[in-house]
Amino acid sequence: MALHNPQLARKLASVLGDDPEAALEHLQSVLAEQSPALASSVSRVLEAADSLVSKYARLHGVQSELSGDAFSDWHLGGGRIESGRNWKQLLGYAEDELADSIAAWRKLAHPEDLKAFNAVVAAHAQGETPVFHCTCRLRTKTGKWKWLLLKGRIIAHDEHGAPLRMLLLQRDISDFKQAEEAALVAKEAAESANRARGTFLANMSHEIRTPMNGIIGMTDLALDTQLDAEQRHYLKTVKSSAESLLAIVNDILDFSKIEAGKLRFEEIPFPLSNLVFDAARTQAITAHKKGLELIISLAPDVPGRVIGDPARLRQVLGNLIGNAIKFTERGEIEVTVSIDEARTESTLLRFAVRDTGIGIPASRQAAIFGAFSQADDSTTRRFGGTGLGLTICTHLVQMMKGRVWLDSVEGQGSCFYFTARLGVDASAQRSPPVAQFSGQRALLLERHPTVAAQLATVLAQCGVDTAKISDSEAAIRAIEKSRAIGFPYDYVLVDALMPPPGGLALAESWRGGSCPEKLIVLLTTEQQRQELDRLRELAVGTHLVKPIAAEDLVAALKLLSGAGDEGTEILAPFDFAADAGRTSTGHINALLVEDNPVNQELARRLLEKRGY
């Protein structure tokens, strides 16, 4: 074998030695001897590869037949489609009724879905996804649309990186889509039925409340008449049952409004402190009848006026306070308000209602916020109620951009918290008590340590040096000692429910008004109704009804010390005439507008009792 290329000859010589031609001849002889074996090996490899391809194709064919899917090999350059199981069969076409072309497939695709298909394929071609998938409607031979799930991958590119071939799986999901649409229709029908039910309940609840208010009002009037013990017991039972039924109706009304989407929120300014105390005072008589102490405390930095829906905020507070009273037999209910987060135009307030009641087991604490749920069945039997109150509170608080939660230990009590985001009315903010009574002294006779601490804090902010005593006899000795040394207390605040000799008995020493100290009697709501005759005989400077607001205590000090400027809003002295009823010496006309006959009669009798 002659080498005619000198350069190649020199390179081969460097590899094969000084006689490259002899070496090449030797190599040729070796290759000639081995070529049949090499050819046989290559042939076997090609046969094995062909067998694997055939098996792969058969496997896909079987899988396609079993699954109902169609596998297609799209030749993007030529626009041709090769199918493992013909996609035409999915659409009801025979093999010869459609061309094996991408153009034929595209003509059958829904225009809107074809846009989505093109978009996901383009994103896949750019390397954004390892595979692409989407849903697409294709028109069948009968003219109907069939839903297909498309999944695929590009498997070959040309030298410029453009896609050449794409594998595509097409799966019929029409049954799934029909079920999905049926479920959506059923969901919309159920929601519509719920809205209709909620509207019906809201309307019916309103119609029920009107006669229930008449029953309660007329029962109150009957209880004010001359009755024997048995009659009074029956009427009290009627009133209690009617109030329970009205509470249930109110819960159902609010819950149905929430479900019907008819609950609306106001955005108006209101005094926060007044709202909190009003919410508590409406239920104070129930707490005081059970011997419970009701304590209200607002942090000094809490805004005086806020912007929101006062009725809904009061509803949440009232519900939590009512629950605390219902589930507490002894001890106290404490309501506190503080700031969680302050902003320029709004503040997130935290409200807490703590009780010393039965508590809630840890296993039931999450469930009680659900509809129609209480701690257990025995709770419903013992205390009554619908189990809707906390559910309603949760919805209302969420609408105020807050949340509700609790801490509780079974047998020791509970503390329910909620937050509410309210706007801040910068035109009128709370002013903390100023030390305008510096140098003055007060003796505070209060049996309950939490109440005593709260009142002493307010007195200290006013500059009053306060001695706290929880024993009546010790208080008498302290008063006598201060008089003996010529340094009597300026004020004596007396809890009317002190143990014997009792707070009112201590007030007997002020009869005639000769004592140097100015007396403030601390009453419960129940005492205010029961002790009129006795209080008329005592020289009481003024009184405060629990729960006591800081503003009311400051106003009482101003009243007794004469420190109030002209026009300053302070407490009036105890007006027994107002509690006993207004006389008709001054002729006053009142116009009553009411379309319900029962309510007309009730309102007329109430106005007449007040002297109108």
Image (cartoon, rainbow, N blue to C red):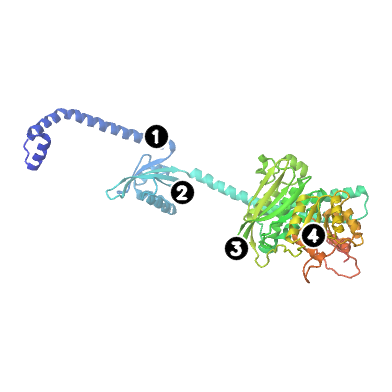
Residue lying farthest to the bottom in this orientation: 566
Disc 4 residue crowd, few under 14, some 14–19, many 20+, Cα 10 Å? many
> Is the Cβ of the residue at disc 4 closer than 8 Å to that at disc 1?
no
Residue 522's quadrant in the figure?
bottom right
Q: Mark 1 or mark 2, which is nearer to you?
A: 1
Disc 1 residue crowd, few under 14, some 14–19, many 20+, Cα 10 Å? some
Q: Which residue is mark 4?
A: 441
| 81 left or right, relative to 384 | left
Q: Mark 2 or mark 3, which is nearer to you?
A: 3
Q: Position of residue 436 (x, y in %)?
A: 75, 65
Question: Disc 4 marks which amino acid?
Answer: Arg
Label located before the other in sequence (4 or 2)? 2
Residue lying farthest to the front in this orientation: 485
Which label belongs to residue 344? 3
The answer for how far apart the CA atoms under marks 1 and 2 are is: 27 Å
Which label belongs to residue 62? 1
Disc 2 residue crowd, few under 14, some 14–19, many 20+, Cα 10 Å? some
| 4 left or right, relative to 491 | left
Q: Position of residue 113 (x, y in %)?
A: 44, 52
What SS does tag 2 mark?
strand
What SS does tag 3 mark?
loop
What SS does tag 4 mark?
strand
Label located before the other in sequence (3 or 4)? 3
